[in-house]
Image: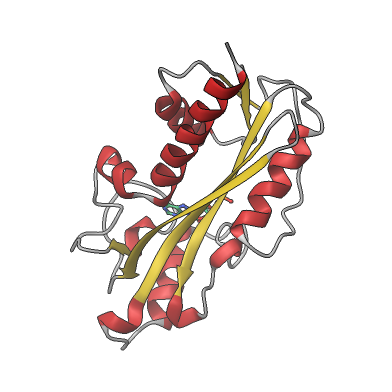
């Protein structure tokens, strides 16, 4: 059975392929499925945005299972911002060095208890029979006092996962995947997809 992952992001494709390895599914990118679509993410939650993307691609891919994800950083002292606007925060073309410095400045003087934050990832699946599932998982933590680390991407240099005294940009990729919002959501989705395959395929 075929799964289309509604993303143009190579790293996300690699991650889903690794996590689905050994399953009976063939995993395709949108491009490999011949779908070129610019989808407006106008939902108000990670879950809604993931579903909007998955539904839009599912309309063009009858018979396939379509997955899509949406993720971001919620900073409690900023009322949950940047949240669903994480990629667009301060403009798509603004560097993460500038975005991260802005968040550090906003939180200047706050104690560790006041610096709580989390990464969230929602993954939606739309099945050929119309069934839909959305799974959200978080990685809890806080915003550090400075940027640190070269691994990862985006807001990783300022994010300290709970129980760690290093940023998620200082963790090796495999270690981050074990605890990350996206790793946890993908592994939970894998379980649902394996259940679906055993119920629907001989
Ligand atoms: P999207 O899920 O591709 O829409 O991207 C969400 C945005 O959230 C990314 O561009 C990053 O800014 C941020 N983000 C999501 N997950 C992570 C992560 O694991 N580390 C750092 N930033 C992240």
- Where on the picture, by quarter, is residue 32? top right
What percent of the width, then of the height, locates residue 124?
61, 44
Q: Residue at x 46, y 25 (%)?
A: 17
What percent of the width, then of the height, locates residue 105?
40, 80
110 or 200, which lies in front? 200
Could you tell whether 134 is left or right of 21 in the image? right
Residue lying furthest top:
202
Give the quarter of the figure containing the C terminus.
top right
Up-down relation of residue 188 to residue 197 (above or below)? below
Q: Residue at x 41, y 29 (%)?
A: 19
Could you tell whether 35 is left or right of 119 in the image? right
Could you tell whether 145 is left or right of 2 in the image? left
- Where on the picture, by quarter, is residue 183? top left
Residue lying furthest bottom:
109
What percent of the width, then of the height, locates residue 55?
75, 41
Up-down relation of residue 128 to residue 122 (above or below)? above
22 or 104, which lies in front? 22
Number of marks present in the image shown: 0
Figure coloring? secondary structure
Give the quarter of the figure containing the N terminus.
top right
Q: Residue at x 52, y 21 (%)?
A: 198
Up-down relation of residue 191 to residue 21 (above or below)? below
156 or 59, which lies in front? 59
């Amino acid at each position: 059975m075929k799964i289309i992952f509604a993303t143009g992001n190579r790293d996300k494709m690699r991650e889903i392929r690794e996590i689905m390895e050994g399953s009976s599914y063939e995993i395709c990118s949108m491009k490999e499925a011949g779908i070129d679509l610019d989808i407006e993410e106008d939902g108000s939650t990670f879950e809604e945005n993931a579903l909007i993307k998955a539904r839009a691609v599912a309309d063009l891919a009858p018979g396939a299972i379509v997955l899509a994800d949406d993720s971001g950083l919620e900073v409690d002292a900023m009322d949950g911002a940047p949240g669903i606007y994480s990629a667009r925060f301060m403009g798509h073309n603004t560097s993460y060095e500038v975005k991260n410095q802005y968040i550090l400045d906003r939180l200047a003087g706050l104690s560790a208890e006041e610096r709580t934050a989390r990464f969230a990832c929602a993954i939606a699946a739309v099945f050929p029979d119309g069934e839909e599932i959305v799974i959200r998982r978080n990685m809890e933590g806080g915003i550090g006092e400075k940027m640190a680390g070269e691994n990862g991407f985006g807001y990783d240099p300022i994010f300290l996962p709970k129980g760690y005294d290093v940023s998620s940009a200082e963790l090796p990729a495999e270690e981050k995947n074990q605890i990350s919002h996206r790793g946890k959501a993908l592994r939970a989705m894998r379980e649902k997809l394996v259940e679906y395959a055993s119920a629907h395929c001989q």
